[in-house]
Image (cartoon, grey):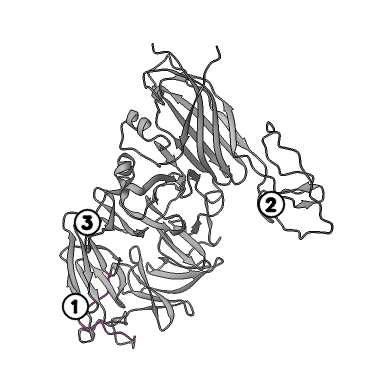
Amino acid sequence: MATQWQTFPIEFRGGLISNMSPLQHGSNAVGSATILQNFEPNKEGGYSKVKGYEKFSTTAVSGSGPILALKVISSGRIVVARKNASNYTEYYYGTGTTWTSMGASASTNGLKVNHAEFTEAGVDKVIFVDGVNFPAIYSTSGNSLDFFKNDSSGDPFDIGTNDPSGAERVAIFKNTAFYSKENILYFTAPFNVKDFTSANGAGSINVGSNITGLVVFRDQLIIFTNSSIKRLTGNTSADFQVSPITDRIGCINGDTIQEVGGDIMYLAPDGIRLLSATDRIGDFGLDIASDIISKDANTFLNTSSTFSSVLFREKAQYRIFAYVESEQSDVAKGLIATKFISQGASGISWATTKGIKAHVADSRYSGDQETIAFANSDGYIYVLNTGNSFDTSEIEAVYESPFMPITDPQIRKTFYKMTLYAEPTGDMNIDVNLKYDFASATNTKKVQPSTFNITSTGNAVFQFGSSNAVFGTATASATNTKKVQPSTFNITSTGNAVFQFGSSNAVFGTATYGGELDTVYDSNVIGSGKTVALRIEDNSTNPTFTLDTALLEFRQNDRQ
């Protein structure tokens, strides 16, 4: 009697989970991960290896210590700040070559810089505050920088009885600039970010606790403190009103506040939370988004007290990075949150990053191009989501599934074959392991099978100037030699068609380009166990690829 094999599908979805017991995890969340490092949950399905980062400029920013400010102005222009030789905060702009100084603060070097954008007389501008000095205003017209001054030098502003020096956070709401300093929120006269004269509509509000962050959200200004969250509504000083959202929990690091997919994500004392508007007018939800990765989140959040965050808007993705000055870049940690539904923590899939050391980060759409940049203390600015390496270093990507019982956790299964469905974009070379029975180190009777390799070579659509473009007599074709494709049939038209560079029939000399890459990879496997886990590793500078589904073929043994 022939042996009857069964097939068990593993659809790669759900992201990282660490708040479930091992058997529950493998039974109820097949395809999720116990380790998902440098893979990101893909909005189109599966897990994709993250892209790399490259230097924005091969010239380092002058000065010492970490980069204190980073603002992406456009895809080709970035403004930064760093401590100079005189211990002042000096600002620079760059377009990808050298960095041009725009001036320095008038007193001691400031702290990490925060910023807010606004438009004045049709010119885009940015306000920078550093917690020590007077604010500075950058203008995209002429790349100029002006500092507030508390003197009679003719600087066109009036601070009145308010003092914006040492402002820590800044936001623009209702055409008014709001500056926070400790527990005081200062606001200017409408349409003038420098006018603090009370007679013109400026003023201040005591919110009772130290302000950690400001963000505009749905026609209200959200004020985060270290122990509460409040909102400011109204249009001018005549009707500005502050009311509480919650007095039970606050935000402990304002650099983690980002609006993503209709929610605000921020770091609270108990993890990464969401501030979500609900169907009830004026009501909010305060989910703990990181509950599903509680073990990984706690480990991550305990590594540092300095964080940065950035949005990948195109991917509906939030990334948060822990910064440790003494740590090497290749071990720096981060978290990825990808939103799959408009609101709520249940629609978020998580992953981790390793190898991105970020003290400051920022992103911006310029036209149809999104630029995401970060910096640390080496003086260079890096652009994320580009290239196949971490600044020439290999990207270590790891996926590991939970231990899955498949059917009955008390019945042994013998495994014979694994089929991996993947979507490579170029060369792919991954190591795969099957692990049985929770890979117990004390079980000397269980021999775990050796690692096997899945490789895909060849070029996808030929792109002029790409790193995998091959000339000569090579044919870039599919790598599956076991599959016999049907014979070609002919349709003829006389004359020459238009030659399209990169098409599947593009021929140069005796070489044909544009062959398709395999998407299905069969591998024979060995071993047996009551539970099985799958581990996939890629540690290379190969292009990104997406893990779609894996199929395990097995025979179920008799109950013993």
Which residue is labeled 3 in the image? 250
Q: Amino acid at mark 1?
A: Asp
- For the C terminus, which image quadrant? top left
What is the CA distance from the residue labelled 3 to the residue labelled 1?
25 Å
What is the CA distance from the residue labelled 3 to the residue labelled 2?
52 Å
Q: Is residue 137 above or below residue 511?
A: below
Magenta span of residues: 156-167
| Residue sitting at x 57%, y 45% | 541
Regarding mark 3 in the picture, which secondary structure is present there?
Answer: loop
Q: Is residue 210 above or below residue 436?
A: below
User: Label for residue 462?
Assistant: 2
Which residue is labeled 1 in the image? 239
Q: Amino acid at mark 2?
A: Phe
Q: Is residue 256 visible?
A: no
Earlier-in-chain disc, 3 versus 2: 3
Q: Is residue 259 above or below residue 302?
A: below
